[in-house]
Amino acid sequence: MKTRKRSNAPIFWGLFGAGGMLAALFGPMLVFITGVAIPLGLLLPAGTMSYPKMLAFAQNFIGKGFIFAVISLFLWHAAHRIFHSLHEIGIHAGFGAKLLTYGVALIGTVVSAVVLLRVGF
Amino acid sequence: MVPLVKRQTRKGKHPMSEQKIIEIEVLRYKPESDQAPHSEVYKVPFTDDMSVLQGVQYIKDNFDGSLTFRWSCRMAICGSCGMMINGIPKLSCESFLRDYYPNRITVEALANFPIEKDLVVDLSGFIEKLEAIQPYIIPKEPRTLEQGEYIQTPEQFSQYIQFTSCINCTLCYAACPQVGLNPDFIGPAAMALLHRYNMDSRDGGQAQRMELVASEEGVYNCSAVGYCSEVCPKHVDPGNAVNVNKINAAKDYFLRFLSPKGGAQ
């Protein structure tokens, strides 16, 4: 029987799945708050996303975790989807495409982790 | 064709309605002389009870005896007569000419397979995949005749019965874009059959089959398009079998160090 190479896809598929779940649960709500409600002054009280409030949010453990998960897992989800969509429309860039898509997600993850740690607790 | 029953008709009306004729465009390929496949159009007289398969048979009987295609049961049981009908993988025996008339209908060999001749595709790759999934019960422990038969509850039976309905018609392979991109992908029908044995309470082969499931030819080639389950004439839902096994393979990937047995290297 021929030997088969184990696929490392579960790592990326897991991150993709987690990001997809998070995107489905929080994505539309975040788009509405940050993109519609705050700029147009709808529903939410004025200054909801003011700098001091957002800084306090980012300095809180739970807030930090939320921001980190939303940025990094969304990126991993998007990277995986773009990588597979490229394959599907006939661009089989292989390792290069992997590096570009997952690379961006990795950089985004590291940058968001560093920034979140630097704003302190 | 001879009309079997002469209908009673009102005075002054023609006993038979006008003969309907449908154009069937067939993808032809003769390996000994053709460089590439080409289309030929035939004008086929038909009645409302005629299937696309019967239309193709009419062409073979009346226009060109060399037209080659597979068929056997004519009633969606054997799985031989799959063809691309207007670009959709279907069993030609359960597709009817009347549903396409008056438009021209195109009939081609199943997509994603090498063409052997005309509408006949080379299934050897598929057969190898079927063999690779170990499609038989691998008992959890050896059992002697004296121990008697295996007992299975209706609940246990219901876990896998759906996946036993596959007739190996390979419509799902013709439908799967990932099979088209990577012919080594184990594919929908083979995964459905693999899942059928994994889910059988008498079977203990899941760890052995995991090597293939978790490999680079395995389930992660699937991007959950779901067209395989849509075209399945037996409602097997191979897409479900593939995606349930993504979860199984992910568990195996991350938990294999806790219980190191089976799985790929």
Image (tube, coloured by chain):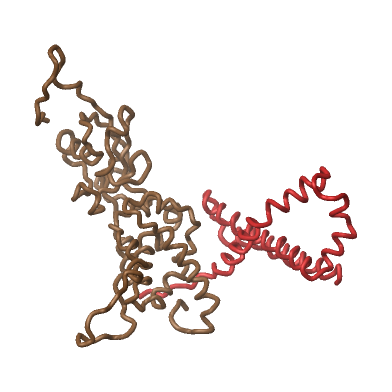
Judge whether B11 appears above or below B116 on screen: above
Identify the residue at horizontal 40%, vertical 53% (top origin): B228
Residue B132 in view here: no
| Outermost residue to the top | B12
Judge whether B245 appears above or below B19 on screen: below
Q: Position of residue A57 (x, y in %)?
A: 83, 63
Q: Position of residue B97 (x, y in %)?
A: 27, 34
Q: Chain B is shown in which shade?
A: brown
Give the image quarter of residue A120. Answer: bottom right
Between B132 and B226, the residue placed more toward the observer is B226
Count every numbered label the image shows and give the total.
0
Judge whether B87 appears above or below A90 on screen: above
Q: Quadrant of the N terminus of chain A?
A: bottom left
Between B34 and A28, the residue placed more toward the observer is A28
Q: Chain A is shown in which shade?
A: red
Between A91 and B223, the residue placed more toward the observer is B223
Would you say A10 lies left or right of A33 here? left
Would you say B46 lies left or right of B236 here? left
Q: Position of residue B136 (x, y in %)?
A: 29, 72
Q: Position of residue A47 (x, y in %)?
A: 88, 52
Would you say B160 lies left or right of A74 here? left
Residue B127 in view here: yes
Identify the residue at horizontal 39%, vertical 57% (top origin): B237
| Outermost residue to the right | A52
Would you say B20 lies left or right of A73 here? left
